[in-house]
Image: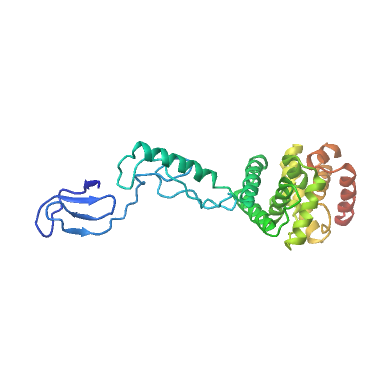
């Protein structure tokens, strides 16, 4: 039992002595002379005296890492602590220390004993790498993990590659959260053919009954303009063009990247900027023919 003197100036109400102590194990505050308990529980807001964290054993923060769907066990697994002491704080004997070490080994091995857990561990390991490569937010990662778990529950992963289905779930999460990431971006970063990712994406839409919102071409415009090195004046002109096109409802059913690229090229022509269609096409990841077709459509519809 570890005792600590809290305040020598406070007197006991029963015996009048100044020896007020607190028990760090139970939180009781009592008199050291007569044992009179002043309060049964003292709320402590400081760090823990011991750490039960899985990763950082020196971290004594009161709260651990939050639960997450992007972890194979959702962050809820327990471990055997690395402090070789018993409940009273006494060090373990040599034989018991050897037994605890073997228990720790078997505990770590038994964390992933089902096929679903092994599947989640591999998939979410790839997901962590994709998060850094594509600069994705935590909301997108959580949504991806949620979609992938639903797909595994319905048995959609059986017979298909884990990275392919994970990439499809990631693209679906980007579409759902409005994050401007194309199918080519996801497939190239995970090193899988675009055709395979799109096939898995259509499977997820059909089997999980997902409703994806239409991608706004305005969100794609800033990225294309930055990669092509266009001025702010051109971006503002393209923004006005896309707003007018949305009001006239002529953007439905068309590729958002192609529309954004055509609006930027039209803005360049209007403002007298000297830039070729090839530069914008490479920045947008579309062909020059697409830009020409969308350019003609926007110019005729908006009468520019």
* x then y, percent, for residue 121: 62, 46
Observer-nearest of 289 and 20: 20
**Residue at the image position 36 percent from the left and 46 percent from the top:** 48
Observer-nearest of 245 and 105: 105
* x then y, percent, for residue 15: 9, 57
* x then y, percent, for residue 92: 34, 40
Left or right of 116 in this view: 158: right
Task: Count all numbered tags in the image, as a single digit.
Answer: 0
**Residue at the image position 88 percent from the left and 42 percent from the top:** 288
| Residue 13 visible here | yes
**Residue at the image position 28 percent from the left and 58 percent from the top:** 41
Left or right of 63 in this view: 137: right
Observer-nearest of 223 and 118: 118
| Residue 304 visible here | no
**Which color scheme did the rendering employ for the protein?**
rainbow
* x then y, percent, for residue 30: 19, 55
Observer-nearest of 114 and 141: 114
Please identify the quarter of the rendering in which residue 248 is found.
bottom right
Left or right of 227 in this view: 287: right
**Residue at the image position 22 percent from the left and 47 percent from the top:** 3
């Amino acid at each position: 039992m570890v005792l600590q003197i809290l305040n020598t100036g406070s007197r006991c109400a029963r015996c009048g002595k100044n020896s007020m102590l607190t028990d760090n194990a139970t939180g009781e505050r009592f008199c050291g002379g007569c044992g009179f308990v002043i309060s049964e529980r003292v709320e402590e807001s400081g760090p823990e005296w011991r750490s039960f964290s899985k990763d950082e054993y020196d971290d004594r923060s009161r709260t651990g890492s939050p639960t997450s769907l992007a972890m194979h066990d959702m962050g809820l697994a327990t471990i055997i602590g690395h402090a070789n002491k018993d409940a009273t704080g006494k060090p373990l004997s040599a034989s018991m220390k050897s037994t605890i070490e073997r228990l720790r080994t078997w505990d770590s091995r038994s964390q992933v004993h089902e096929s679903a857990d092994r599947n989640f561990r591999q998939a979410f390991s790839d997901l962590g790498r994709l998060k850094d490569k594509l600069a994705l937010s935590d909301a997108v990662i959580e949504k991806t993990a949620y979609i992938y778990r639903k797909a595994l529950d319905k048995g959609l992963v059986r017979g298909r590659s884990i990275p392919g289905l994970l990439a499809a779930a990631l693209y679906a999460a980007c579409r759902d959260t409005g994050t401007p990431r194309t199918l080519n971006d996801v497939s190239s970063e995970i090193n899988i053919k675009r055709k395979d990712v799109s096939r898995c994406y259509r499977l997820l839409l059909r089997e999980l009954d997902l409703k994806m919102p239409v991608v706004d071409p305005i969100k794609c415009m800033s990225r294309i303009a930055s990669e092509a090195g266009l001025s702010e004046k051109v971006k503002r002109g393209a923004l006005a063009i896309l707003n007018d096109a949305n009001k006239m409802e002529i953007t439905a059913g068309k590729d958002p990247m192609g529309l954004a690229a055509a609006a930027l090229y039209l803005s360049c022509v209007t403002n007298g900027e000297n830039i070729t269609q090839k530069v914008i096409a490479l920045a947008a990841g579309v062909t020059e023919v697409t830009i020409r077709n969308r350019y003609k459509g926007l110019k005729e519809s908006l009468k520019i």
